Image: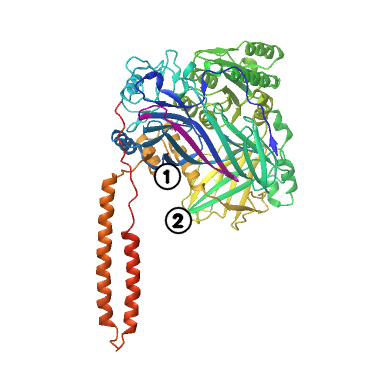
Amino acid sequence: MASQVLRNDGATNPYLLSPMLVFNHPDPKLRFASAVDTSIDVEINGLIAIAEFKQVFVNPHGIALDGQYQFPLPEDGAVHYLHMRVGEREIEGTIMPKPQARRLFNQAKATGKKASLVNQHRPNLFTNELANIPAGSEVEITIRLMMPVSIHNDQYSLRLPSAITQRYQPMRTQAAAEQTLRSRNYLSSDVSSNDVSSNDVSSNDVSSNDVSNHARIHTRSGDLESGTSGSGLVRHLPDTIHGDNKVDSKLAINVQLNAGAELAKISSASHQIAVVASDYGRYNIQLASGEASADRSFEINWQLASSNAVQVATYHEQIGEEHFTLLTLYPPNSTLKSQINSSLENPLSDAHAPEVSAEMNQLARDMIFIIDTSGSMQGASIAQAKASLQYAIKQLNPADSFNILAFDSKVSRLFSQTQMATSENISRAKHFVSGLRADGGTEMYQPLSQALVMRRSKAADTQRENVLRQIVFITDGAVTNEFELMQLLSHSTQNYRLYTVGIGAAPNGYFMKKAAQFGRGHYVFIQRQQEVLDKMTELLDIISKPQVTNLELSFDNVIHAALDVYPKRLRDLHAGQPLQVAIKSSLPLTSFEVTGQTPQGDWYRSVVIDESNDADTKFAKIIDDRGESAKEVDEKGVAKLWARRKIADLLDGLVTGKPKEQIKNEVTTTSLAYQILSPYTSLLAIEKPVASAEAAVKIARAKRHDIREKLANSRLAVQESLQLMMPQTSLGWLSQLMLAALLMISACAVYWFGGAKPKPVVQQSKAQSL
């Protein structure tokens, strides 16, 4: 099986570049010299993926240098492994608190040791600092993470970011960022941050003011996350290289997919891929060309062959006395009605599983469309956004009211209030959208705040009552003030739902998903203009179709006295939008109940987990009131995914106003206990000190002398012991035989240990001071 997909062509976007290594070379012109080639190996088993990112850094210069690299990773991944190879040296990293990691890294850097420090600055944005890269040498960094597979409309997908969109940060000055860069030799005294961008660097701690719901992590005095240009555009180090300094980093991907069932299709919306089926339910996927430019995210999708729909699936992992379960709730979909009707033989069905009414597809809506027209949307992104919006306007019903807000550094509104979707108003809306152009900054706060409190026109108010406001936000999310935006959404008292549409080759997926989470809506990602029709159709169907609200999970409180469940607050279920819940318990889960409401009444499911671990069954059967059981599959990585979800939930508390120090302590404790990266911890790898060749020879000789002396003493002691303990016969042949055997063993040991030559050791030279 093979799938070929055209790439997302369009005008060049100057805000989206492939990554590179930035050196602290004395000559500013030689700092942006090295591309960072990345290979990604992914193993997918059911709903859990293990991804290994291997990045190769090269120092082409004649002196040892320090370097820094900024790279994206999936925002829902749990980073837990770091390995560094320099020549023949192999070094593994350890997760530790940021202050300790920074201190040890700086000490290693000052003493000429090779070191690597990985920090998380947003859930989907990391930096890797390298110290003392030898002249003309190659450094290979391996980072490993675990992440869940996404499920949408019965389609499974995995998205691996490989490019970063420059982000706009409103109302920021450059002075602090320039001072930080100069102090670390990344910026000379005659170069401004407009020429060389600031960096998302980490310091001794995370400031209480600046921890922005793990969306924007600032640092203390002297260490500022990023600088801005005069226009307010954030200049991240790897993303601001233009002209002769621009490099083309390469990307190679290898995916081993164990779906556990036969697939109907495998496709990629981002790259041409080659697919080979190796066994039942097992597939190997690679880039058709072997490698590609790291200028856009890689996305792979697969769909199961026609079979009974799955409603509940569980994955389990036990570590010590703790049990971890990843539970997937599949929502009522288009086949819900037939499934419910087929189970009417159960007396509980009439009361707990009401029939779905077709009238639910005709819900009146008060819709506000927000479209991003900032500079980062230039090229294909603005074309996709306008096409998405034009399509959405055409789908409005006469019973709907609507408005359009376009924003860059300022907000432009189609109407002052939401208006009914008459033919005249729709015509005005189409003309408004056609005239939109991408330019300027990305000031999201104003359009969002206006949309939350915007009044409806008199016509809209008199015709309908209690209409739910639905906000559709189309953007690439290229901002750094996510914290303020999510606070706005979290603290709003309005009854609304927010649906975000991520546009472009590398949208800020973390912000888009998190904003939808706080707005109790959903997120859609559109990478190619050819996808606009399908993806917007899906989104509008989600908005208009029935949903199950006020979901709650119930467990046996007697058996499970203390459960730790994430997320704490379950979102609504829409068609084609499953919900995953991570649970930690002291005993294995055996059953649970799910309750909620539909417009027709209460909704109920009882689930019994089958503990017989059938390795061939990767997905559960349909679970309903008849008591059918779900197959549970043992899977590595569930514990780390649970810990990742817990950290995300804890950091959400920064938005809702929980004590920052308490959150920091709990996040750090969880991060260290389960060895996954967090905003308060770092992954550090430092080479161990190596003795000189002369010292190594002396140590080896001393050890050899000690071994010989101990063996000689041992032979004497054995001989004396045998003479005392053994019967003294006339021949004494037994004692002599045993003594001879011991002497032979001792002689071999002396020869083996004593004659070993110490391996030559090269003394580590200290890097030049720059």
Q: Is residue 663 located in the magenta-colored stretch of the structure? A: no
Using the rendered view, name the quadrant where residue 546 is placed. top right
**Residues under numbered marks 1 and 2 in contact, where contact means CB atoms less than 8 Å apart:** no
Of the pair 456 and 563, the residue shown nearer to us = 563
Q: Which mark is residue 656?
A: none
Three-letter amino acid code of the residue under disc 1: Gln
Judging from the image, what secondary structure is the residue with disc 2 in? loop
- Residues rendered magenta in the picture: 42-66
Of the pair 459 and 622, the residue shown nearer to us = 622
Q: Position of residue 655 (x, y in %)?
A: 44, 31
Q: Position of residue 120 (x, y in %)?
A: 43, 34
Question: Disc count in the image?
Answer: 2
Name above or below for residue 17 compared with residue 92.
above
Give the residue at x 37% y 17%. 174
Which of the two labelled residues, at mark 1 and mark 2, occupies the earlier sequence position? Answer: 2
Image quarter hosting the C terminus? top left
- Indicate left or right for 246 with 279 as reference: left
User: Which residue in the protein does label 1 denote?
Assistant: 675
Three-letter amino acid code of the residue under disc 2: Gly
Of the pair 624 and 694, the residue shown nearer to us = 694
Q: Position of residue 235 (x, y in %)?
A: 44, 20
Judging from the image, what secondary structure is the residue with disc 1 in? loop
Could one spot residue 21 in this view of the protein? yes
Q: Position of residue 400 (x, y in %)?
A: 67, 21
Image quarter hosting the N terminus? top right
Q: Is residue 48 located in the magenta-colored stretch of the structure? A: yes
Magenta span dominant secondary structure: strand
What's the distance in space between the residues labelled 1 and 2, CA to CA?
15 Å
User: Which residue in the protein does label 2 denote?
Assistant: 320
- Indicate left or right for 33 with 374 as reference: left
Q: Nearer the viewer, mark 1 or mark 2?
A: 1
Q: Mark 2: give few (<14), some (14-19) or many (20+) Cα within 10 Å.
A: few
